[in-house]
Amino acid sequence: MPKLKFIEGEEHRYYEFSTLKWFPEATNHRGLAKGGIYLLSGPPGCGKTTLALQMMVDFAFRGEKVLYVTLEQSPSFLKATILDRIFPYRRSIFSSIKKKEKRNDWRKQLENIGKTLSEEEAMKHIEKRIEENMFIDSSVNSMDNLPDFLIRQVMSSGAQYKDIKIMVVDSLQGLGTAPTSSRPYRSLYEFNRYAKDEGITCLLIGHVTKSEKIAGPRSLEHNVDCVLYMRRAMKLRPLFVPKNRYGPERHEPFCLIMNKWGCLEKSKHMSARASVAYGYLPGTNRLTEVQTLVKLPKFGVRPGILAPYLPRQKLRQIIGVISSIKDVDVSDLTFEINCYLPGGSFYSHILDFPLAMSILSSYFQLPLPPYSVFIGELDLSRKVRPISDESFFQNFLNSLTEVNTFLQIKNIFISSFQVELLKHFLSQKNLNIKVIGVADLEELIYEIWPEIGSL
């Protein structure tokens, strides 16, 4: 048995990315460790394959030969994803680089290319280099065959992929492998050992169960060096690192976003922001403040609603109405809601509107119009219902003018059916407040936040 002093220390070297600049921040190490075994898991459609292809294209651009072993998608589908989504995205990155010296960093990766090349010519050379360095193999038909494939096709002298040092296996459960089966996973662990001994970096792509657990036996996580876990939340793709040999774990979400090319990049919305909306309860003499914080749950924590003293079923109904709006997905999110009800008052449907606006403001991370009050009940079709009791407005104005609240109010949002009625009451009080009629919640969103189309 060798003595401790004769055992060589492990020095981690990394394959670093040129375009995925967010990766070190998200994972707390510089890139993919050479000889490291990574597991990327997440629900269907969250972008696992796209992210893996982005990584491999990046390495191929840097001159590394990479192999994508597909057990699920066809090679033609993967090629189409690269040509139709990843290449256009990379062109946009190259075009957006302002400083010539940074553009030259891309050109330096290519041989025999002069500085006189146009942007279009440079990108053609870059993409040709990527196509030459990237291999896609669909000959493996099960995890059982992975060790034999690695030995014969990668490690052996004269093997087809002899110089490959970076591999992807997509996906572990792609051919219907039951998560509880142990024999295929034993073959996978053997494959991992061979790859690590050979210094080959492997990115394994796996599924999750209905309960959002990583599919496969518990031993799967113990047989990899780093676990990357993605969730879906609207256009965001929160990324977690629950296991990490190469740095600290990440249980707080790191927010990626699916951009217009269908590729993953760092989102601008990295942290949750609270929002406040104001409404009014009958019988009180002050505005009712609704505070909402919409955020991504931590890893291992299920989404939920934290709203003391508020009716849970009503909140779920309002969240369901919001979810029916096009391009708004508030599933898999956590809601922290605080609503001050003066004098021990009970929740009223008149607070539906300000509550919905507070949720949307926090969700979009965009401010509401300042000094605004929202009055009205929401129906299931996103319409703002008129107040049935017309005496409400008289009481509303009388009680609030007593405490000079209107000195700060500039806008009142209300059902479009009652705009003229409210204007009439305001004129009687000589109050110069703008009344904005709302017929549909979705229309109001695009009216006060026209920029959300680009989020």
Image (cartoon, rainbow, N blue to C red):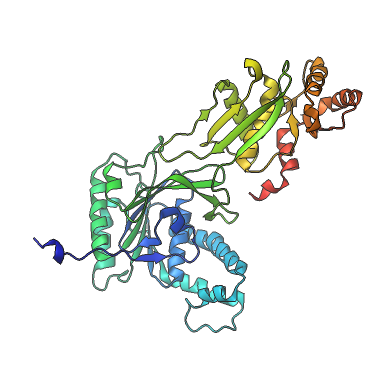
Q: Residue at x 23, y 48 (%)?
A: 186
> How many marks are shown on the rendered structure?
0
Q: Is residue 438 visible?
A: no
From the viewer's side, name the closer residue of 296 and 321.
Answer: 296
Which residue occupies the foreground of this view, 80 or 236? 236
Q: Is residue 90 above or below residue 74?
A: below
Q: Is residue 272 above or below residue 56?
A: above
> Percent position (x, y) of residue 106?
51, 73
The quadrant of the rendering that contains the N terminus is bottom left
Report the residue at 70% width, 30% height from top. 278
Left or right, 280 with reference to 360: right
Q: Position of residue 446 (x, y in %)?
A: 72, 42
Tell me residue 168's x, y (percent): 37, 58
Residue 31 visible in the snapshot? yes
Residue 327 at x, y percent in the picture:
63, 42
In this view, the residue in front, 373 or 399, is: 399
Left-right relation of 152 to 442: left
Q: Residue at x 66, y 19 (%)?
A: 342
The quarter holding residue 67 reads bottom left
Q: Relative to 307, is 272 above or below?
A: below
Name the outermost residue toward the left: 1
Q: Nearer the viewer, residue 30 or 327?
A: 30
Direction from residue 25 to residue 316 in the image, left or right = right
Q: Going by the image, does 409 lie left or right of 38?
A: right
